[in-house]
Amino acid sequence: MDGEAAREATELPLACDLSALTDEQWKRHRELYRRLRADVKEVRELEDGYAFRHSAGGDMLLAIAQFVANERFCCPFFEFEIAVGRGGGPVWLRITGEGQAKRVLEAEMGVGAREGAANPSSARPLPPAHRLL
């Protein structure tokens, strides 16, 4: 199987599984969403997703990790990467995916190149959401 065929064979459907979390987990996930969204310092558009810079504090890092731990079950088509800068540097959450996953992320978050993704203050307001930053 060549690289393209292998990728197509492993590409996950772009469908969120809302049954992946219990009601209590969803409640906590929404709390984490609001906390992370309020803490976004910068948004960078990537070829296949977005990167979000957050505060460097340990409590925010834990909140990001908890968010990712839940989000990966309900939206398995996303890939997550948490990067922590040395010496107390920035914390970045990158959310990426194949195919149209970036468009799903844009719809959920209300960000995009046309909307000022590099500057969260110029991006259009986010709709009420239950999952993503």
Image (cartoon, helix red, strand yellow):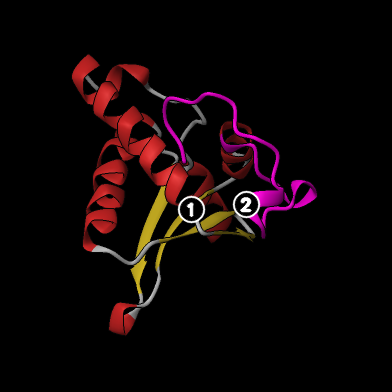
Prevailing secondary structure class for the magenta stretch in the rendered image: loop
Nearer-the-camera pick, 83 or 124: 124
Name the mark on residue 40: 1
Please give left or right for residue 109 compared with residue 53 in the image: right
Residue at image x 44%, y 39%?
77
Q: Is residue 2 visible?
A: no
What's the distance in space between the residues labelled 2 and 1, CA to CA? 8 Å
Res. 109 image quadrant: top right
Residue at image x 76%, y 46%?
115
Res. 68 image quadrant: top left
Q: Residues within 10 Å of mark 2 (few under 14, many from 20)?
A: some
* Residue named by callout 2: 120
Above or below: residue 31 compared with residue 115: above
Q: Name the amino acid, label 1.
A: Val
x and y, in percent, of residue 110 in the image: 64, 37
Asked if the residues shown at circle 2 and circle 1 are in contact, with their CB atoms under 8 angstroms apart, the answer is yes
Q: Secondary structure at mark 2?
A: helix
x and y, in percent, of residue 112 in the image: 70, 47
Nearer-the-camera pick, 110 or 119: 119
x and y, in percent, of residue 97 in the image: 51, 48
Please give left or right for residue 76 compared with residue 119 in the image: left
Magenta residue span: 109-133
115 inside magenta stretch: yes
Q: Is residue 51 visible?
A: yes
Nearer-the-camera pick, 71 or 92: 92
x and y, in percent, of residue 83 in the image: 36, 68
Instruction: Say which label, 2 or 1, has the lower sequence index.
Output: 1
Q: Secondary structure at mark 1?
A: loop
